[in-house]
Image (spheres, rainbow, N blue to C red):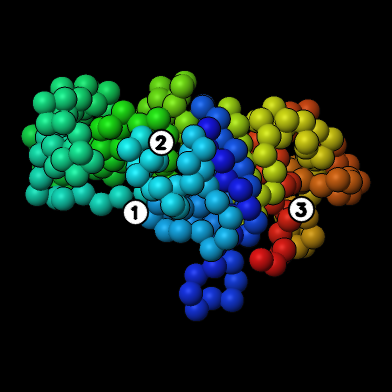
Amino acid sequence: MLEIDGVSKRYKGSDSFALRDFSLDVQPGVLGLLGPNGAGKSTLMRIIATITKPSMGSVTWGGSDITKRPDDIRRVLGYLPQDFGVYPNLNADEFLRYMAAVKGVNRKAALGRIDDLLAFVNLVDARKRPLGSYSGGMKQRIGVAQALLNDPEILVVDEPTVGLDPEGRVRFRHLLAELSGDRVVILSTHIVSDIEAVANDIAIMNSGRLVRRSSPEDLLRLVEERVWEWVIPSSDLQAVRQVHLLSSVVRHSDGVHVRVVSDESPGDGAVLVDHPSLEEAYLYCISSHRGEAV
């Protein structure tokens, strides 16, 4: 189990905290770490990956403090950072052999592992092409392959679908879903649909703090009777945006159909929505904690 206990992070020269008193325990399965840009997700991922150290608090893996004994988690860690770079002149085989050597994977074992991983990420036919010719989605898949070279017990992926087209995002989600089970998978993103597709556990962050941690079902129950559909004239839309939290805006011949996330009815004619979305639950949680200083 991964245990994050009271972790704070303040960078040198800054008066504010990227993380503030953050605590979370993570069991096997897929944890979706959800939050807006700047919430502190990438900072937390870098701490887990032992790239940076917390200013306060501790992170333990199997009872071992990873700040004091980083190799204990590095041996079993797979990491796909947000800004994953490749060597454009290397092909997939060459790149993965190089990464296996860096990770200390036995050469003979690595060759068979590379064959299996290229098949898993559907890149066998492109294995001899230079990585510089790969699409964004293909580069993300080779990133997953390198993260899995040491058959990690904990896999950390940070904003993996940013920049991917819809087909690439769906393919990537399927890959992550297949990787769950006995492995701890932490998916950090601000894209709710990515979390909804693969995560069985969700932690919402904002301004460096943990806002809420629950199952997708519990999050959805949180916004029951808090999402409204309301038909308004086009001329009122801008004023409504200033006052209410809107999750959807659709124009029809009878006016603008908006979905409003609110504890109370936004106005005459508004009706409760039968099935709120996970994105609306996320918006409700974030709006309730927006503006808190860290």
Name which of mark 3 and mark 2 comes first in the sequence. Answer: 2
Q: Residue at x 35, y 31 (%)?
A: 152
Outermost residue to the right: 268
Indicate the position of residue 254 as horizontal and vertical percent values.
75, 42
Q: Is 131 on the left or on the right of 138, as rendered?
A: left
What is the quadrant of the C terminus in the image?
A: bottom right
Distance from Cα at disc 2 to Cα at disc 1 = 16 Å
Relative vertical location of residue 175 with respect to residue 204 in this rendering, above or below: above
Q: Residue at x 56, y 41 (%)?
A: 3
Q: Amino acid at mark 3?
A: Ser
Indicate the position of residue 144 as horizontal and vertical percent values.
31, 36
Pick whichever, 86 or 13, lies toward us: 13
Residue of label 2? 155
- Label of residue 83 in the image: 1
Q: Toward which corner of the image does residue 165 lie, by quadrant?
A: top left
Residue of label 3? 288
Distance from Cα at disc 1 to Cα at disc 3 = 30 Å
Name which of mark 1 and mark 3 comes first in the sequence. Answer: 1
Q: Amino acid at mark 1?
A: Asp
Mark closer to the observer (3, 2): 2
Mark 2 residue element:
strand
Q: Residues within 10 Å of mark 3 (few under 14, many from 20)?
A: few
Indicate the position of residue 291 as horizontal and vertical percent values.
71, 64
Q: Amino acid at mark 2?
A: Leu
Q: Residue at x 77, y 45 (%)?
A: 261
